[in-house]
Amino acid sequence: MLSALQNVLKITELRQKIMFTVAMFLVFRAGAHIPVPGIDAAALEQLFQQGSLFGFLDLFSGGALSKFTIFAMSITPYINASIIMQLLQIVVPTLEQWAKEGEEGRKKITMITRYGTVVLGFIQALGMAWGLRGSGALLRTDYVDVLLIALTLTAGTTFLMWVGEQITDKGIGNGISLIIFAGIVSSIPHGIAVIYQYLKAGTIGPLSVILFAIIALIMIVFVIMIQQGQRKIPVQYAKRQVGRKMYGGHSTHIPLKVNQAGVIPIIFASSVLMFPTTVAQFATWPWLKTAAGWFAWGTTLNTALYALLIIFFTYFYTAVTMNISEMAENMKKYGGFIPGIRPGKPTAEYLDRIMSRITLGGAIFLALIAIVPQGIGWVTGIQGVYFGGTALLIVVGVALDTMKQLESLVLMRHYQGFLK
């Protein structure tokens, strides 16, 4: 392992990419400590202690939201804009055509996504600033001050989007994903400090810490296994003669991932469930607050709906992003077939049946990984340390993808990489 790391550092280009990525991380963490002017820190802290949508999003901003810094919204508007554009490619013919045009089409889609990020970011920032105005967390409540806060937060998100794109172009891995990864990982030292304080105060014992570590390790291993799990469908290409040359005749496979949807279903489900409670915080109607209490985080109704919504969105997002019919048609066009299955419609039906079965496993996995962490605090007695399935999926997924990219760059110059 040590020799493999030395091989990585010996490659000048790779060393420069790693140093650039680390430098961008430092910029991100520095901006996460620059506060937005006009915020009452004491009132803001009290708001976060009540538990709201702000508290949920704080994890992905690396603590920037609880301090209400210029990076308080993190890269969330960009993620929302990217998901919307991905869904629109299915229903808008022009966007679907651009997606098939290669590099030029992707440039057009990327440009629209950037504009969408700014628009969504401003709307979200304006809503956050207006919500804080109603909660008394602003020192001045003039409309100009609210607008200034919204513009500052939008500028911070836009700058983070640029930083992410720079990491993708000049660094290692996907820049947007790495920014989210850095925000989540930056909360680990705080969690360790909280556990140490509990131990020092005698609130918990060493056995609880060991149990917490064992559960965390099992969840990490479980996530890696499912994230890497896939069903390989064998595909045989028939031989065909073009002129005097013979083409085809080789075998390959279609890798169908168990968790094709990634972390998107959890984000969708949590957003839907948090909407009523978030609206109720800014409303004055008693019936609305009572109804929102039914959906409070950790209640039986909330947990059951959370699991069902995750399963629904897993199937929905997988169906939207995977065009089984087009896949079967392309196989037929190039002379490919699944052994024992006729090309065309029978192949599409077979792939759809296989995908439905493995998607069920992926959906149940996502539901479990999202719900189980709620019971960790109850089992171990450790409260105030967030160890959620969403964060775990993102961290593990980004780490695996980045390591694979780093491995491929090393193998271009050496016969041996560092992944076993």
Image (cartoon, grey):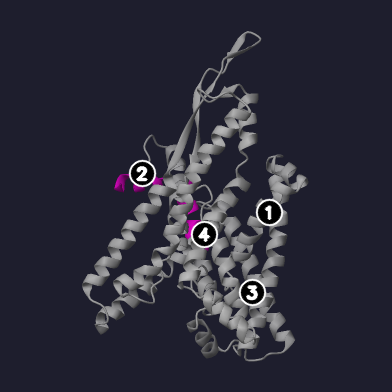
Q: Amino acid at mark 1?
A: Met
**Magenta residues?**
1-24
Q: Earlier in the sequence, mark 2 or mark 4?
A: 4
Comes first in the chain, label 1 or label 4: 1
Residue 10 covered by magenta stretch: yes
**Which circle's residue, 2 or 1, is located before the other in the chain?**
1
Mark-to-mark CA distance, 2 and 4 = 40 Å
Measure the C-alpha gap from mark 1 to mark 4: 25 Å
Q: Residue flagged by tag 2: what amino acid is it?
A: Phe
Residue at x 62% of width, y 81% of height: 288
Q: Does the segment drawn in magenta span residue 336?
A: no
Tell me the mark number nearer the camera, choosing from 1 and 4. 4
Q: CA distance from mark 4 to mark 3?
A: 34 Å
User: Does residue 118 appear left or right of residue 417 in this picture?
Assistant: right
Amino acid type, residue under disc 4 in the picture: Leu
Label 3: state its secondary structure. helix
Residue matched to label 4: 308
